[in-house]
Amino acid sequence: MGLKKSVMLADDTVTIMDKCTDKRNPDNAIAWSNLVNRGIVICNHLMKSSMPDLTNQEWQEILSVYAGTCGSLENPPFRIASDMMDNLGLIDIDKHPNKDLVKKVYEMSQAEQFAILSFNEQYWHGDWNTCSDFAEIKNKILV
């Protein structure tokens, strides 16, 4: 059973949703619920299918950059490498303690960075008290 909620949609969201509505039939109205639900399902699928392969240590370093926040998820383009540099107040990549990870993230696609930030949001907003280790947490988020 669905849950009925009232939401406020940004102008850009309404414009995009309008573009997804068939204009050939003037009686067609924007299918608000369908488009919102579809968008969430697609984002979740893209997150899971675009997830880059990171070690637990790399995950911990990236997660610590955001320290409980979801980062810049709502404001693409995504710039995790810049966030990693800014987190330490650095401009010179050679001064970063893990410059190889910064370079690795810098070379990732926007879809991969979206996946990382989506994971980050779920990680910091989740209650993981019943999990025994980070692998179990990753599994719960990515299933």
Image (cartoon, helix red, strand yellow):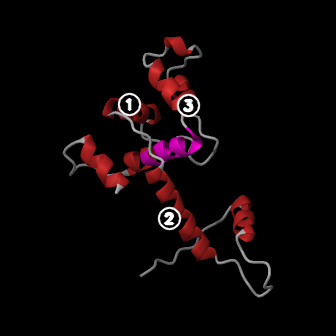
Mark 2–mark 1 CB contact (< 8 Å): no
In this rendering, which labeled residue sits more in front, label 3 or label 2?
A: 3
Residue range highlighted in magenta: 109-119
Rendered residue at 55%/25% (across/down): 86
The one of 10 and 62 positioned closer to us in this rendering:
62
Residue under numbered circle 3: 107
Q: Position of residue 36 (x, y in %)?
A: 58, 69
Q: Earlier in the sequence, mark 3 or mark 1?
A: 1
Q: Indicate which disc residue 58 carries.
A: 1
Rounded to the nearest whole Å, what is the CA distance between mark 2 and mark 1?
Answer: 27 Å
Q: Earlier in the sequence, mark 2 or mark 1?
A: 2
Tell me what residue is drawn at x 39 percent, y 29 percent. Answer: 61
| Quadrant of the snapshot with the C terminus | bottom left
Residue 3 magenta-drawn?
Answer: no
* Three-letter amino acid code of the residue under disc 2: Val
Q: CA gap, disc 3 to disc 1?
A: 15 Å
Q: Mark 3 Cα within 10 Å, few/some/many (few <14, many 20+)?
A: few
The residue under the point 27% across, 41% down is 134
Mark nearest the camera among 3 and 1 is: 3
For the residue carrying disc 1, how many other residues have a C-alpha within 10 Å: few (<14), some (14-19), or many (20+)?
A: some
* Mark 2 crowdedness (10 Å alpha carbons): few <14, some 14-19, many ≥20: few
Location of the N terminus by quadrant is bottom left
Residue visible at 63% across and 75% down?
A: 32
Residue 79, horizontal then vertical, whole percent: 59, 34
11 left or right of 137 in image: right
Q: Secondary structure at mark 3?
A: loop
Residue 90: x and y in percent read 55, 17
